[in-house]
Amino acid sequence: MSIQRETLSLAADCSPVATHAIGQDAATSVATTLKALSDPLRLRMLSAIASDPRGESCVCDLAELAEVSQPTVSHHLKVLKDVGVLASERRGTWVWYRIEADRRRAVTTLLDSFAPATVAAPWSVGSPDEAQRPNLDARVTRLAEELAAEVPELEASVVLMTVRESYTSLARSARVTSALIPLTERFARQRLSDLTRDRDASVPQVLFVCVANAGRSQLAAALVNQTAGGRIIARSAGSSPADVIHPHVRSILAEIEGDAASERFPKPLTDDAVRAADVVITMGCGDVCPVIPGVRYEDWAVGDPALASAEGVEAIRDDIAARIRILIDDLLTPPTSKESA
């Protein structure tokens, strides 16, 4: 009898009070969609459609992604259409595909968050063990004291907090600890500049935000600074910054900025940067930016260089450059000229 009571007690302890698993119908639907997506070519076509500035892609464009026949491409697109991911429209000879409106957010999450997380980045290494980090607290404190003297309008405690936060956030992803203090100084200077920015006396400021701040947002900021010639300030940040910039992007940055490109590094997104910006442009990182009154927000659907070939990265650069020319014209056109137009 006692053994029976003990068995019943153990069974009661192991039984969940309630289950939060998705229902059978929902699980079947999700599994069906994931099965349709479980093909490299289909994922590449989905990425091409999602990042096409036109919001849709022609089947003739998608056929160039792989050395397969057009009927094979059409078959893969039909599979994605059958599970409700894509919609299509025939115009003359060709069929055009776009992502179904109610699936766009899910597709964006898949391509911009899940995909990079599953790709082993050969240029990146894991975060170093915290126990192996040198104790740089004294150097960080000394740096804060030096910067506090340069911005007397801010209290020394605010500067110290900003410097320490900058160091801590960069240390999470840094793989070379010897560069932490110089990077902290540059990042902290930028943040202090944001804190003390006078909008009325400053040129327009644009903040580009992506996930890793290792590709498209870095490219966009460099292109704005080059094209605007000082009439606009562009910065970039990442919702989950990588440790280094993607090598394909770094080579393009070197073409744009020369030696100055070596000073670029991934930076985390801060509220200070958002508040200081006149325009915040997200690039595949979803709703990560805090909504600040008076700040204009845009979302650009552009490809991720981390998932592209060298040629693909150049195409992404050209796409961003075209968008930037429109942005610069808009920011530098006087309001009266816009109204008369």
Image: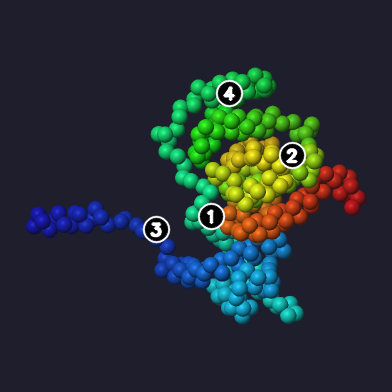
> Mark 4 sits on what residue?
143
Q: Is residue 314 above or below residue 64?
A: above
Tell me which corner region of the image, top left, top right, bottom left or bottom right, holds residue 226: top right
> Mark 2 sits on what residue?
233
Three-letter code, disc 4:
Leu
**3D distance between C-alphas at marks 3 and 4:** 50 Å
Residue 132 visible in the shown view: yes
Residue at 65% x, 48% y: name it.
251
Three-letter code, disc 1:
Pro
Are there few (<14), some (14-19), or many (20+) residues within 10 Å of tag 1?
some
Please report whichever mark, 3 or 2, sits nearer to the chain's N-terminal start: 3
**3D distance between C-alphas at marks 3 and 2:** 48 Å
Callout 4 touching callout 2 (CB < 8 Å): no
**3D distance between C-alphas at marks 1 and 3:** 28 Å
Single out the mark in the foreground, 4 or 2: 4
Are there few (<14), some (14-19), or many (20+) residues within 10 Å of tag 4?
many
Three-letter code, disc 2:
Ile
Q: Is 29 or 138 nearer to us in this picture?
A: 138
Please report whichever mark, 1 or 2, sits nearer to the chain's N-terminal start: 1
**3D distance between C-alphas at marks 1 and 2:** 29 Å
Residue at 65% x, 59% y: name it.
312
> Mark 1 sits on what residue?
116
